[in-house]
Image (cartoon, rainbow, N blue to C red):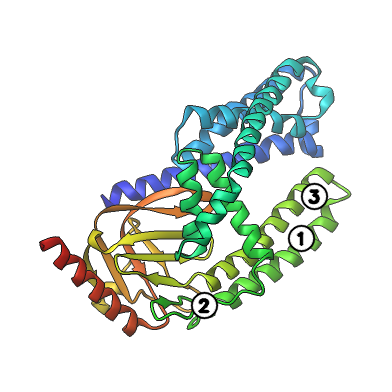
């Protein structure tokens, strides 16, 4: 099993490396003096190769990196690759391939119309969703996702959109809110420098943004704008992530455990789905396997979980941008481990007694 996991990680890393190589080499080919000098007199063959790279090879490598194979996803990536080709390949070289280029635009246009219709449905159902959220006692990260999932259970685009909406809400709309101080809630970050570390990253991104934008705006305006947008998005994400971490402490209910770590990951665990709780320090200090999801505030020091939950069967967690993945073990580190262990054991024993009745 360990060799299989390692093999999958290696394949994923190689796919990401090749994906970046394909995109960067095609960009350098048309936007550097070295690349332009190496272009032959007849450019049609080179342009066809670039179009195939961006619309076929790059999507396949992206799917291999994500380890998520779907025909619908592949078609979307192909159309995106054709649109990217319009920006990477100079327009004078694409004169003979306008039909192919417009095909990508057409596919994206149809998809955008479909997504706009889903967005209209979301807006139409906004009031029932908000009422459902307000009536729930769960943390917002869970109540919002559950309310949307009840209305649109299989709409991946809407789940991604709602994940982005949460990011902007926490980044800009929560500064007057205070975290819950109830007895059944536990923070994960106060005994670490995690938030300080996040703020340092934000400062580094701001400095990098100013520097790169100044260096690139004269040589490649498009690349400069793309990097500027990505860096602004990263800053908004880190700010929202800090706020989401502060305002959504781990919550223990009678039958469930709601644990999240900012915007990056969250998970609902029923006590009846827990097979075993491991507290042995020697085991907890060993390397955590890839089948384990961590809810640990990591900073400059090496830290270990307070306890490890072994599940009866893999349970689904929600990751960045609404991505779903199942895990067999859950590693948790809280700021008040003794109280947390006590309440978890009590709830687990109660769940085990209820199963025997």
Give residue 196's quadrant in the image: bottom right
- Spatial separation of the CA atoms under disc 2 and disc 3: 32 Å
Near-viewer residue (203 or 89): 203
* Front position in the image: 34 or 12: 12
| Total marks in image | 3
* CB-based contact (under 8 Å), mark 1 and mark 3: no
Neighbours of disc 1 within 10 Å: few (<14), some (14-19), many (20+) = some
Sequence-first tag of 1 and 2: 1
Q: Is residue 205 above or below residue 131?
A: below
Q: Could you tell me how far apart the alpha carbons at marks 1 and 2 are, in whole angstroms? A: 24 Å
Percent x, y for residue 306?
A: 33, 77
Q: Secondary structure at mark 1?
A: helix
Disc ID at residue 224 = 3
- SS for dot 3: helix
Q: Earlier in the sequence, mark 2 or mark 3?
A: 3
Residue at 65%, 25% (x, y): give it: 110
Residue highlighted by disc 1: 209
SS state under label 2: loop
Residue 94 spot, x, y in % from top left = 78, 21
**Which picture quadrant has residue 98?**
top right
Task: Find residue 307 and report its horizontal and vertical position in percent.
Answer: 30, 73
Confirm whether residue 220 shows in the render: no
Q: Earlier in the sequence, mark 1 or mark 3?
A: 1
At x 67%, y 27%, the residue is 82
Within 10 Å of disc 3 (Cα), the crowding (few <14, some 14-19, many 20+) is some
| Image vertical order of residue 108 relative to residue 208, above or below | above
Residue that label 2 marks? 300
Seen in the picture, residue 65 relative to 253 is either above or below; the reply is above
Which quarter of the picture shows residue 99?
A: top right
- Residue that appears at 49% across and 61% down: 135
Give the distance between the C-alpha atoms of the residues marked 1 and 3, in whole angstroms: 9 Å
**What's the mark number on residue 219?**
none
């Amino acid at each position: 099993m360990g060799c299989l996991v390692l093999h999958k990680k290696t394949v994923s890393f190689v796919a990401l490396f090749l994906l970046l190589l394909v995109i960067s080499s095609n960009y350098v080919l048309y936007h550097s003096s070295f690349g332009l000098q190496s272009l032959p007199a007849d450019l049609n063959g080179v342009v066809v190769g670039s179009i195939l790279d961006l619309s076929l090879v790059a999507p396949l490598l992206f799917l291999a990196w994500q380890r998520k194979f779907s025909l619908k996803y592949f078609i979307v990536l192909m159309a995106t690759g054709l649109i990217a080709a319009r920006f990477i390949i100079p327009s004078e070289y694409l004169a003979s391939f306008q039909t192919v280029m417009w095909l990508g635009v057409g596919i994206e246009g149809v998809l955008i119309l479909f997504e706009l219709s889903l967005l209209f449905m979301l807006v139409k159902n906004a009031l029932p969703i908000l009422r459902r959220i307000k009536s729930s006692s769960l943390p917002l990260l869970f109540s919002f996702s559950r309310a949307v999932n009840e209305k649109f259970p299989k709409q991946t685009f809407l789940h991604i959109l709602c994940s982005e909406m949460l990011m902007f809400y926490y980044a800009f709309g929560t500064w007057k809110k205070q975290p819950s101080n109830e007895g059944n809630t536990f923070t994960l970050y106060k005994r670490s420098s995690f938030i300080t570390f996040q703020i340092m990253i934000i400062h580094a991104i701001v400095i990098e943004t100013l520097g790169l934008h100044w260096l690139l705006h004269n040589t490649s305006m498009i690349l400069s704008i793309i990097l500027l947008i990505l860096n602004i998005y990263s800053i908004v994400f880190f700010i929202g992530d800090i706020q989401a971490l502060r305002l959504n402490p781990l919550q223990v209910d009678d039958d469930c455990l709601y644990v999240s770590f900012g915007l990056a990951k969250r998970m609902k665990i029923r006590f009846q789905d827990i097979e075993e709780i491991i507290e042995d320090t020697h085991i907890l200090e060993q390397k955590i396997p890839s089948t384990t999801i961590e809810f640990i505030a990591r900073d400059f020091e090496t830290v270990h979980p307070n306890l490890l939950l072994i599940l009866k069967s893999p349970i689904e967690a929600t990751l960045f941008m609404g991505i779903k993945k199942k895990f067999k073990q859950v590693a948790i580190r809280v700021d008040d481990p003794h109280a947390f262990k006590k309440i978890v054991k009590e709830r687990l024993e109660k769940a085990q007694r209820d199963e025997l009745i």
